[in-house]
């Protein structure tokens, strides 16, 4: 994995910054919804994410925009129309996230695993 120096000179994995943004609650959900639409307006996005507050959605969109994963287009209308879409960087990331999802699905642990030794212990 690539490393970059931290402020104190110690090496740090370059994934740390991106993972910090993606690891925040709702971030991956927002990106997933954006993969299903070319552009989406704020309220439509909010309706697609039951349980998220407007404040948190605004924060996540701003963080993703700062990371270069989301673009925000404001139309000079009354009331203002704002549309969000994925950037090329986010589309590239989506390929990686899909692979990560396949990996997670492959290695997820079942709710209950019964091995022969566990069954024998239970029956004794």
Image (spheres, rainbow, N blue to C red):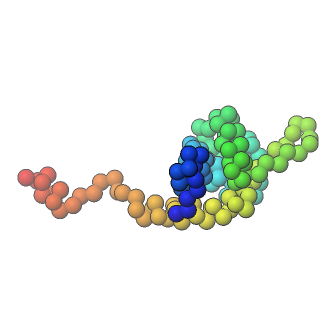
Please name whichever residue, 46 or 14, is drawn nearer the observer in this view of the structure.
14
Q: Residue furthest left?
A: 124
Please name whichever residue, 55 or 44, is drawn nearer the observer in this view of the structure.
55
Give me the residue at 17% from left, 62% from top: 116
Residue 79 in the image, given as x and y percentages of width and height: 88, 36
Is there any visible trace of residue 29 in the rendered image? no
- Above or below, comparing residue 72 to residue 99 in the picture: above
Q: Quadrant of residue 82?
A: top right
Is there any visible trace of residue 41 in the rendered image? yes
Give me the residue at 72% from left, 56% from top: 86
Please name whichever residue, 68 or 72, is drawn nearer the observer in this view of the structure.
68
Q: Is residue 41 left or right of residue 110?
A: right
Q: Quadrant of residue 94?
A: bottom right
Give me the residue at 12% from left, 58% from top: 120
- Above or below, comparing residue 70 to residue 57 in the picture: below
Q: Is residue 27 left or right of residue 45?
A: left
Give me the residue at 23% from left, 58% from top: 114
Residue 69 in the image, given as x and y percentages of width and height: 70, 54
């Amino acid at each position: 994995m690539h490393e970059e120096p931290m402020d104190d000179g110690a090496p740090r994995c370059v994934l740390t910054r991106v993972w910090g943004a993606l690891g925040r609650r709702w971030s991956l959900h927002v990106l997933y919804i954006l993969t299903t639409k070319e552009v989406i307006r704020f309220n439509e996005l909010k309706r697609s994410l039951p349980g998220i507050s407007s404040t948190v959605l605004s924060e996540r969109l701003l963080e993703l925009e700062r990371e270069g994963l989301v673009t925000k287009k404001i139309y000079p209308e009354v009331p203002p129309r704002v549309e969000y879409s994925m950037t090329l960087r986010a589309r590239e990331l989506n390929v990686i996230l899909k692979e990560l999802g396949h990996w997670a699905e492959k290695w997820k642990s079942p709710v209950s695993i019964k091995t022969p030794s566990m069954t024998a212990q239970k029956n004794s």
